[in-house]
Image (cartoon, rainbow, N blue to C red):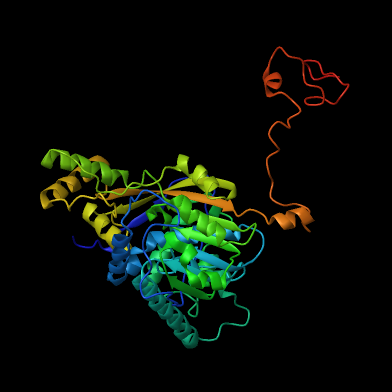
Amino acid sequence: MAAAPHAARSLSTTTPTSDSGSTPYSPDLHSSASKPKLGASFRSAQIVFDRETKRLQRDRAAFHPDAEQAAYLHDHMALRSVDRIRDIMGRFEKVLDVGARFGHVARFADPEKMGSVYGVELSGEMVRRGQEMRTQRMEAAAAAAASSPPADAGADPLADLLAGGSAPAGATTATTAAASSTTAAAAAAADGDSDAEDRSTEDLIEQEDAVPYMAFVHDEEQLALCEPLHQHGPFDAAISSLSLHWTNDLVGALSQIRLALKPDAPFVGCVFGGQTLFELRTSLMLAQLDREGGMSPHISPLIDIKDLPGVLTRAGFTMTSVDIDSIVVRYPDMFALLSDLQAMGESSADVQRQPSLSKDTLIAAAAIYKEMYGEPDGSIPATFDILHMHGWSPEDPDRVAAGSSCGGGQPKPLARGSATHSLRQALSLDAPPLEGLFTPTGEETDTKGKK
């Protein structure tokens, strides 16, 4: 399958059902072992994904010639995840990035909100390639700054850039190849995300690699066994951007993230949802039925948004919330999409996956895809459902008992049975108004609103 020309790819976002943002990326290499420790997580779970296969896929993706350009989706979602952290009051000195890949979150981390980022990644080759990318960007930025002429005394290049002008010669941007996908993703976020109207992503791209970053090679399913994390933790916040959908025990993985956090610390994550690539899934099924007389799954199962709140609660997080985004990327054809998925390391890793499809079936699937979903300009859309999740680690019981200096603390539901009014009576049309609930005690109001 020939790789698609990346200039032909376009990314757009549909209107999200809740807030979305824009945000950051980058790494320093520190391996806890030459290879990550694989196996079941510390909680028993059904084995759905082959973690060793996933590690090999990410290793190969790290060596892919288009790996940096194909990371546009992970860059885009890292920007959004970090931007959600920016919306939380306070500063987070130590941030844990679970499933760091090339260090997308650390690349765009805001130095005003984050002190340092510690990444955990299954693939050692991805960590090494991310280190090389970070070094290249920093060297390119230093060379550009050294060769740029002195700015005018009264000029404000950042203000000019944010106002729509050209970037200053000494701007701290990544290399041309790396910046192209990031800029496209940021533009898509600004175009499709209403919450981004009052902020700009250029400031995050402008300050790339501004936060210290250290990466550890370890299986994300076994954070509790990662010794370097014990040395640097506990952490003030945690982010996981497009990684946890490959875990066999999502509850167990989230529980370990919670245990790595300080009390009352935020977690922000996102995963691919169950409707991701429904166009590709449908096209492959129809082509298989037509050419082979049967069908088998070739796209890994993904979590549904209705299951996510319960998963977060079971993992021990409090004040949880979830929302969904839909991102549409347009490709020249189905083979360009498959090539990019391979370059991302996002190919199927289902333990029950079937052998590769025949050439005849793939050609039929490509024709069905274009016939059913093709755009007037000849391109095809690929929909990625992004499920966002937020939660907080529980408060320190000793701190709660002693009383918070802020006078607040995490809000909690009232004890069961402590209600003083009946919901049935409140909703009944025949029952008299509850005293003290709808009108001040001792006052009556007629139908015209007069006392």
Assign the N terminus to one quadrant of the image. Answer: bottom left
- In depth, the one of 7 and 403 nearer the eye is 403
- The percent coordinates of residue 317 (x first, y second) are 57, 50
- The percent coordinates of residue 142 (x first, y second) are 47, 84
- In depth, the one of 344 and 128 nearer the eye is 128
Q: Is residue 312 above or below residue 339?
A: above
- The percent coordinates of residue 15 (x first, y second) are 47, 45
- The percent coordinates of residue 267 (x first, y second) are 55, 56
Locate residue 242: give its quadrant. Answer: bottom left
Locate residue 174: give its quadrant. Answer: bottom left
Q: Is residue 311 above or below residue 174?
A: above
Please indicate whether residue 369 sits to the left or right of residue 142 in the image.
left
Q: Is residue 177 visible?
A: no
Q: Is residue 308 above or below residue 199?
A: above
Please indicate whether residue 163 sits to the left or right of residue 334 in the image.
right
Q: Residue at x 73, y 57 (%)?
A: 398
